[in-house]
Amino acid sequence: MSRPVTGYILLSSLIFSLIASPLEAQDEDGFFPPQQIGAGGAAAVMSAQLSLPALDDRLADLGLEPLPGSLTLFGGEGIVNIGHVLIGFSGFGGQTQFEATAGGVYREATVSLEYSGLVLGWVKAAGKFKFSLGAAIGLSRLTVRTIRRPAAGSNWTDLWEPYGTAFPGPVAAADLETAMHIEGSCLSLAPRLNARWWFLPFLALDVGASYRLGTIAGGKLTADGREIPGSPELDLSGVGLRAGLFLGF
């Protein structure tokens, strides 16, 4: 996830918590009233399951390892609850990188997954706990960036020669330097279960589980902004487990 998006989420969370503080608070024993207006935000880390055999095959062609099975995503959310109704915004993003050198050629691939969306749900207070059941509805985006270059590196002249009209002939495979940006996105639905435990009047441990549903249709991937004919269908569905700290009431 980009830094501006993450910063926006955390700033919104702080604003929500400041608005909510005079409206709803725990009593002197640390318990919530049965009906409340509350708000706040969480900064969290998520382990997101991701299995893409079609991409693993291409990584193997480059001499790189397959995806590890899950990615670590960082992000957060800002929410407001009025009575038992919860609404908010959530966003997470993360990446993993592979690299290898063989035959004098360096190869690298970076796989990124981002998710952001609207959160809707039902919330129930019980003592120092709040439990919520709902779903996040939004957009998932997969990005793959690849780099291929001579392991020894290229000087200023070598970098430009293959693109010039005066270049005398074909570029040797070991001297070729290329980069590619592949991207695809899809609508996602993530049913989720969440629990928060307030160990301080304004700070809670936030844990949750979700299952992300979403598939990038075949032929909908792009390479450097252009559609790729015959690109495979990629199922981004998977389990997500997250934990973090929630600031608010």
Image (cartoon, rainbow, N blue to C red):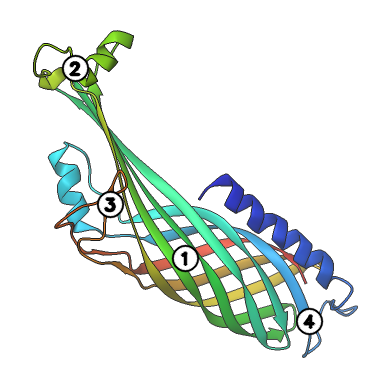
Residue 152 in view here: no
Q: Mark 2 vs mark 3: which is more N-terminal?
A: 2
Q: Amino acid at mark 2?
A: Thr
Q: Which residue is mark 3?
A: 222
Q: Which residue is mark 4?
A: 37
How many C-alpha atoms fall within 10 Å of the one at disc 4: few (<14), some, or many (≥20)? some
- Tag 1's secondary structure? strand
The CA distance from mark 3 to mark 1 is 29 Å
> Where in the figure is residue 249, as x and y percent of width and height?
78, 72
The CA distance from mark 2 to mark 1 is 53 Å
> Where in the figure is residue 5, as x and y percent of width and height?
58, 53
Q: Mark 2 vs mark 1: which is more N-terminal?
A: 2
Q: Which residue is mark 2?
A: 165
Q: Which residue is mark 1?
A: 241
Q: Amino acid at mark 4?
A: Ile
How many C-alpha atoms fall within 10 Å of the one at disc 1: few (<14), some, or many (≥20)? some
Mark 2 or 4, which is nearer the eye?
Answer: 2
